[in-house]
Amino acid sequence: MNSETLFAVVKLVIFLPMIIFLIILSAKYGGRYLNKLGSGRLIKVYERVPLSQNSFLSVVSIAGKPYIISNTQNDVKILLELSQDDLEVYKNNLEGFDFNLIRRKMKNEKVQ
C-alpha cells in the first residue's frame, strides 16, 4: 500500500462515522424544527396528487376546515368540504382516505 491509499483509508475511517453521526443528529432534531415551521400557517396542504400534467387534487385545511380541492392551470375549485373526523382519519392512516367514501359524499349519497 502506498502512502496516498493509506491516507485515504485513514480519512475514510475518521470522517465516515462523523458524517453518519451528523446525519442522525440532523434527522433527530431537524424534524422538530420543520414541524414547528408550518404550525402557524392558515393554509396547510396535506397531500397533492397529480391527475394530469396540469391538474392536481389536493387535501388542504383552510383556517382549520378541511377541503378537497382541484387545482388546474387556470382554476382552483373546492370540490368537497370534509368533516374534522375525516381529516383525523386521513392523518392517522398512512394510506390516506377511503376514496369510495369520498365519491359517495360527492354524489350526496348516504354514508354509513
Image (tube, rainbow, N blue to C red):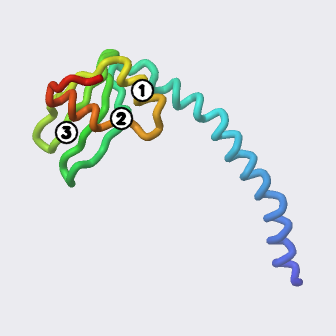
Q: Is tag 1's residue or tag 2's residue first in the polypeptide sequence?
A: 1
**Front residue of 66 and 23:** 66
Residue 69 position, x and y percent, is: 22, 32
Q: Is residue 10 above or below residue 88?
A: below
Q: Is residue 71 above or below residue 16?
A: above
Q: Is tag 2's residue or tag 3's residue first in the polypeptide sequence?
A: 3
Crowding at label 3, few (<14), some or many (≥20) Cα neighbours within 10 Å?
some
**Front residue of 101 and 67:** 101
Crowding at label 2, few (<14), some or many (≥20) Cα neighbours within 10 Å?
some
Q: Are marks 1 and 2 in contact (CB under 8 Å)?
A: yes
Left or right, residue 15 beside residue 95: right
Residue at point 36% right, 35% down?
A: 97
Left or right, residue 85 beside residue 51: right
**Front residue of 45 and 93:** 93
Crowding at label 1, few (<14), some or many (≥20) Cα neighbours within 10 Å?
few
Q: CA distance from mark 1 to mark 3?
A: 23 Å
Q: Is residue 13 above or below residue 47?
A: below
Left or right, residue 32 beside residue 97: right
Judged by depth in the image, the label closer to the viewer, 1 or 3, is: 1
Give the structural element (helix, strand or loop) at label 2: loop
Task: Looking at this view, name the residue that lies furthest to the left.
Answer: 74
Give the structural element (helix, strand or loop) at label 3: strand
Q: Please name the amino acid that badge 2 sits on.
A: Phe
Snapshot quadrant of residue 90 = top left
Q: Please name the amino acid that badge 3 sits on.
A: Asn
Snapshot quadrant of residue 70 = top left
Residue 43 position, x and y percent, is: 32, 24
Q: Give the residue at mark 1.
A: 89
Residue at point 32% right, 23% down?
A: 61
Q: Give the residue at mark 3.
A: 71
Q: Quadrant of the C terminus?
A: top left
Q: Give the residue at mark 2.
A: 97
